[in-house]
Image (spheres, grey):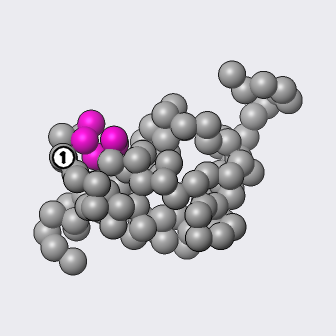
């Protein structure tokens, strides 16, 4: 793994809570909802770009693959298939049933 990728993964791991909240703002992300890899990939790219760590498409995809494994190990993402996960993060549970928007 190169230094550039390590730096980006470290940023994601160190700021995991901030990153998850960032994803929730950018994408429809709720407890027990499905979340697709491509949305996660773009979320990683936009987050790193906003943190002044410009990341190209391929780098962001590699970081997303590696960081998603961390979230799977923590039980935050439960793999459904090769395209995505079920979000298991109770902080993102909706309180009132109905349209979240």
Residue at the extreme bottom: 1
Q: Secondary structure at mark 1?
A: loop
Q: Position of residue 20 (x, y in %)?
A: 49, 45
Q: Residue at x 59, y 70 (%)?
A: 82
Left or right placement of residue 27 versus residue 99 in this view = left
Is residue 14 among the parts visible in the rendering?
no
Q: Position of residue 69 (x, y in %)?
A: 49, 71
Q: Position of residue 16 (x, y in %)?
A: 43, 52
Is residue 94 among the parts visible in the rendering?
yes
Task: Please state which of residues 1 and 88 is positioned toward the viewer in this rendering.
Answer: 1
Residue 21 belongs to the span the image colors magenta: no
Left or right placement of residue 78 versus residue 1 in this view = right
Q: Quadrant of residue 83?
A: bottom right
Task: Considering the whole magenta stretch, tell me its main secondary structure.
Answer: helix
Q: Quadrant of residue 94?
A: top right
Q: Eyeballing the image, is 45 above or below 99?
A: below
Residue 47 belongs to the span the image colors magenta: yes
Q: Residue at x 61, y 37 (%)?
A: 28
Q: Position of residue 98 (x, y in %)?
A: 84, 26
Left or right placement of residue 22 versus residue 15 in this view = right
Q: Residue at x 18, y 46 (%)?
A: 54
The image quadrant where one finds the C terminus is: top right
Q: Eyeballing the image, is 53 above or below 73?
A: above
The image quadrant where one finds the N terminus is: bottom left
**In this figure, which residue is indicated by the disc labeled 1?**
54
Q: In this picture, which residue range is highlighted in magenta? A: 46-50
Residue at the extreme top: 101
Q: Residue at x 52, y 58 (%)?
A: 37
Q: Eyeballing the image, is 5 above or below 14?
A: below
Residue at the extreme left: 3
């Amino acid at each position: 793994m190169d230094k550039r990728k390590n730096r980006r993964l470290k940023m994601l791991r160190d700021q995991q809570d901030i990153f998850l909240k960032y994803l929730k703002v950018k994408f429809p992300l709720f407890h027990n909802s499905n979340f697709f890899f491509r949305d996660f990939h773009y979320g990683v790219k936009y987050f790193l770009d906003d943190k002044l760590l410009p990341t190209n498409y391929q780098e962001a995809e590699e970081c997303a693959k590696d960081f998603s494994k961390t979230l799977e190990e923590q039980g935050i993402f439960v793999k459904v298939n090769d395209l995505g996960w079920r979000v298991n993060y109770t902080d993102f549970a909706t309180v009132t049933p109905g349209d979240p928007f």
